[in-house]
Amino acid sequence: MTDNSTTIYRPGQSVMCKIESAEPGGYNAVVVGSGLPPSAEPHDDADHPQIKAFLPSIEPLKIGQTVPATFVCMHNNRALMTFAFMLGTTERVQHSTASDEDNAFAIWVDSYPSTQKLRRAIDLIMPAVSGKLFRELNSSVADTSMLLTELELANFTGCVKVRSEVQKSRSAMLLFEGRVAGAIYGRKDAQETFAVEKAMKQMKADIGEADTFLQVYELPPDVVLAMSALFLGCPVAKDKEKTLLDYFDTTLISISVSGETGCLTFSESEDGSQPDILVFIKLGQPFGGYKIADQIYVEEAESLLSEIRAIGKGAVEAHILPEQLLSEAMTFGYKLQT
């Protein structure tokens, strides 16, 4: 998609944002300060209209409040922002030789690390929809060192699952067009699972060892993007005064109205640490889902929504991918090979 948005800002630049209204995952805002040095040339404010922005936040903010933020990127004449919490980010990006698109992704993942604290490790990542494996390798008898390079060059979209007999670990990596859109790693002697960057590092180490088994299979791009919201997206804040079903229904409605892409998780346990159902959402519309215990893909999302409503208790969480993440203004996903 070609984006004709233009801006005077660069990724990592400090700005001030005025909060205008709430929306799923955060707030609609306008940029009111650029952090730029004063211009030597006089100008008319009419020549510099306010830039609208999306500022993700799970913390409540007041309408009309002005907050410091960091510019990430621009798409469809709307800026994506993060809070100005990561003190090292701006300086690191300003000295970066990478493209603005790469820097935009670096700023985003510095500011919004995964909030997932999951005990189910790779069960969270669904198996192949077709039931057929693309490739299955054993590092003891196959050259696995070239695998990641091949997947990157092929712009592969799907999943790599890894099981190490040496480390007693299981892990999985979501790939979207040859880049890492999510990862999770669990080991028998570890108390918790590791997500994304830590998971990627551990997985690559395991792949290089003997007695490591790999499965590689394709997944539909829409499914990968929806699941990636759990790792690279931003959570939709909960209203503690609402019941599970109230939050569930109002979140679905607000995501539909705003046309978001993302994933909704449902857990029968109150702490939500072991999701039972994933519901995939594309441009505001649920289109399918995944029953984790049964390891099956469900094509009709409505049956899953009805099942969640019938149970009526547990925990629901929602994560969205702001549209700027999937635009040409950002390189979405981690580089598979560094």
Image (cartoon, grey):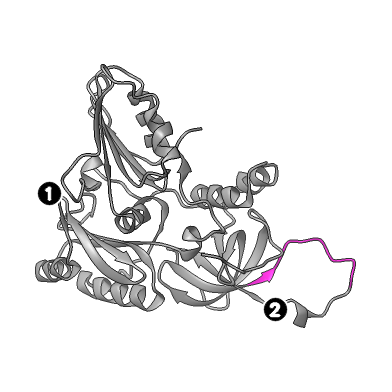
- Name which quarter of the figure residue 211 lies in: top left
- Provide the residue designation for mark 1: 293
Of the numbered discs 2 and 1, the one sitting upstream in the chain is 2
The amino acid at mark 1 is: Ala
Against 318, is 172 above or below? above
Asked if residue 147 lies left or right of residue 98, the reply is: left
Closest to the observer, 13 or 62? 13
38 magenta-colored: yes
Tag 2 near tag 1, CB within 8 Å: no
The answer to if 54 sits in the magenta stretch is no
Crowding near pointer 1: few (<14 within 10 Å), some, many (20+)?
few
Residue 97 in view in this figure: yes
Q: Which residue is mark 2?
A: 49
What's the magenta region? 31-41
Task: Label 1, secondary structure: give it.
Answer: loop
User: Residue at coordinates 25% horizontally, 46% vertically from top-left?
Assistant: 125
Nearer to the camera, 139 or 168: 139
**Up-down relation of residue 4 to residue 208 (above or below):** below
Amino acid tagged 2: Pro
Where residue 105 appears, as percent x and y from the top left, is 53, 50
Q: Does the rendering let one see residue 192?
A: no
Q: Is residue 104 left or right of residue 179?
A: right
22 and 47: which is toward the camera: 47
Name the residue located 49 percent from the left edge and 49 percent from the top edge: 109
Q: Could you classify mark 2 by the number of other residues whose Cα lies within 10 Å: few (under 14), some (14-19), or many (20 or more)?
A: few
- The image shows residue 267 at horizontal and vertical percentages of 18, 57
Task: Please tell me which residue lies in front, 236 or 150.
Answer: 150
Q: Secondary structure at mark 2?
A: loop
Residue at the outermost front position: 154
Residue 192 falls in which quadrant of the image? top left
Residues under labels 2 and 1: Cα distance? 52 Å
